[in-house]
Image (tube, grey):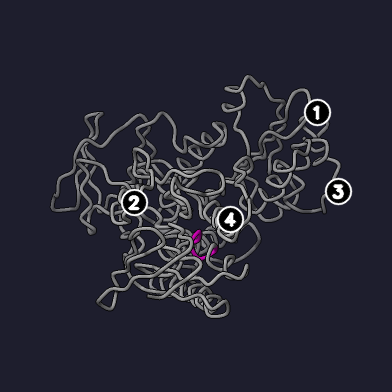
Amino acid sequence: MDQFDLVVIGGGPGGYVCAIRAAQLGLRVAVVEREKLGGTCLNWGCIPTKTMVAAVSLLEAVTRGGEFGLETSECRLDFQRLIAKRDAVISQLAKGIGFLFNKHKIRLIQGIGRLDGPCRVAVALAEGGSTVLAARRVVLAPGSQPLQLPGLPVDGRWVVTSRELLASDRVPESLLVVGGGVIGCEFAGIFAALGTRVTVVEALPVILPPVEPEVARRVQAVFRQKGIEVRTNTKVTGLRQVDSGIAAMLDTGTELVVEKVLVAVGRSFDTSQLGLAEAGVVTGPRGEIIVDDGMRTSMEGIYAVGDVTNRGLLAHVASAQGLVAAANAAGGQAVMDYRAVPNCIFTLPEVAGVGLTSQQAEAQGIKPRVGRFPFAANGRALCSGEGEGFVKVLAHPETDRLLGVHIIGPHASDLIAEAALAVRYGMTAGHVAAAIHAHPTLPEALAEAAEAVHGMAIHS
């Protein structure tokens, strides 16, 4: 029986980051992965979609070329070459993880792992047969899967999840997106830019419900400007195959006929094959693994990280949890801090936020002071032809401490890093405003929004 200090079940962001850090701390580590190293994020989520976002961003930029005197009449997108580029990026990053595993002497085992009593992991090997690993500590990082709704059966061809849609070798003429959350909105923006006629159906009154409401409303307005039909307060009650594709019946009495239906209503946690009950690991009502802020489960020596903990289904949350679990598996006392987790949505334009929304602040009895600054008044944004959107800063009315920052506009996912640092370390709007920001740059918009909290923005 092979013996390890730590065995990680799952090779997604939380799993492989945990494994590398544990090896850096001197532990002998093995990772059991049932599919591809890097998990959903690298192979079927964050990385492939952002490669496609980069392509459609370039396409949109080129279509604005006339504003800058550029002749762009011959511009077109070759979807097959885009797929090749996307796959090349995935391959390069996957090889990078493999290189790091070799560098740190981490053993990768392809197969399905499950707990098999105290300090043991049983593995059904992908190549056939089985093995058992002895482990002083175990980290569970199985990730999550697309949630499927009763009455909307996914067949992988006409009715698909994000995974099957990414595997498609052609752009559909029309697409119904069921679910106006992050995944649904990102795919809506990508395929609309590729020429697909897109309709988004959301059961709630607004799309992107976790987002700052003012930002979500702006996204919805931009979608409509781009020809994306958005139907809120609407549910799909049934689907049927027709000659021209799929007919979707809505609870409003309308029927939509589209080529494909994307079901993007969230993620689920399938922990049934991990042997949790037999090992005494407590799970929640959705199958999520219950952990404390040190990523410890209910059983000594067993940790869990990533989506399966249901503490924020984001790759960077999983990675941070992996670092905490590795530190504690090596004898440390690390804890997670979820107060300043940035959330990025790669629509066009991008959306990002950190800290409290205005609704969350008011639910805590706080009426924040608000500062806004439009990108239409930012020199760099206008130079680039990207004046859509704004920065919104929420500050405590008494202490001026930053409660939250919310952005819709160019490079929002990059700009939020400064805001996350400020929120994480309790800085004030005054601190952000006082820091000298280079000109002409997009981060000036954050500084001006911080000035606007006190009614002192120069350019608005």
Q: Tell which of 453 and 311 is nearer to you.
A: 311
**Residue 109 vertical position relative to residue 282 in the rendered view, above or below:** below
First reached walking from the N terminus: tag 3 or tag 2: 2
Residue labelled with disc 1: 454
Residue labelled with disc 3: 436
Q: Nearer the viewer, mark 1 or mark 4?
A: 4
Q: Position of residue 293 (x, y in %)?
A: 56, 44
Position of 72 compared to 148: left or right?
right
First reached walking from the N terminus: tag 3 or tag 4: 4
Residue labelled with disc 4: 328
- Tell whether position 432 is magenta: no
Q: Nearer the viewer, mark 1 or mark 2?
A: 2
Position of 258 compared to 293: left or right?
left
Mark 4 belongs to which amino acid?
Answer: Asn
Q: CA distance from mark 3 to mark 4?
A: 39 Å
Write the start and end of the magenta stretch as one range.
13-17
Disc 4 element: helix
Instruction: Say whether marks 1 and 2 touch (CB < 8 Å).
Output: no
Say how many tags the image has. 4
Q: CA distance from mark 3 to mark 2?
A: 52 Å
Instruction: Say whether marks 3 and 4 touch (CB < 8 Å).
Output: no
Q: CA distance from mark 1 to mark 2?
A: 53 Å
Mark 2 belongs to which amino acid?
Answer: Leu
Q: Residues within 10 Å of mark 3 (few under 14, many from 20)?
A: few
Disc 2 element: helix
Disc 1 element: loop
Q: Residues within 10 Å of mark 2 (few under 14, many from 20)?
A: some
Q: Quadrant of the C terminus?
A: top right
